[in-house]
Image: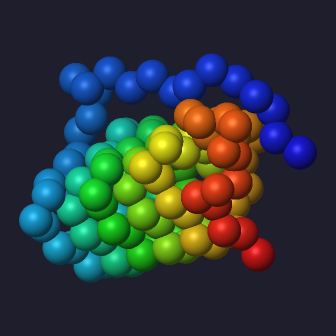
Amino acid sequence: MFQKKRTVEVDPEKINTVIGKNTFFEGNIRSESTLRIDGNFTGQIEAKGNVIIGEGAKVQANISSDNVIVSGEVKGNILAKGQLQITSTGKVYGDIEAVSYTHLRAHETGRNLVCR
């Protein structure tokens, strides 16, 4: 179902948009580049780069992006045209579609993933 690949590496210098900790944002985001969320976001996300959900972040949104890295919590559907990576602190509640999937604690694959 999923292809195993290396983890996504993101150059911090190429992150163009950041929603910081203790920030609450509601709306729709369309980005031509990489986006990082460390705070709270509700809405829709479409990005042509990577979407990074930082540890402690809470996102209620459908996400469509090239690659998605989840270290926080996502309640919504994820469409990753490339790789979906869920770290040991990441949680996803929703449907996912990805070319490849990586869970950084492979022996616990699915533990923090709830799909319909």
Name the side, left or right, on which 14 lies relative to 96: left
Extreme residue in the front direction: 107
The residue shown at (59%, 36%) is 105
Render colour scheme: rainbow
Counting from the top left corner in percent of width and height, residue 48 is at 49, 44
Counting from the top left corner in percent of width and height, residue 23 is at 13, 67
Q: Is residue 93 above or below residue 103?
A: below
Name the side, left or right, on which 4 lies relative to 10: right
The residue shown at (56%, 34%) is 104
Extreme residue in the left direction: 22
Name the side, left or right, on which 52 lies relative to 104: left
Q: Quadrant of the C terminus?
A: bottom right
Name the side, left or right, on which 15 lies relative to 77: left
Q: Is residue 32 above or below residue 40?
A: above
Counting from the top left corner in percent of width and height, residue 93 is at 58, 71
The residue shown at (36%, 40%) is 34
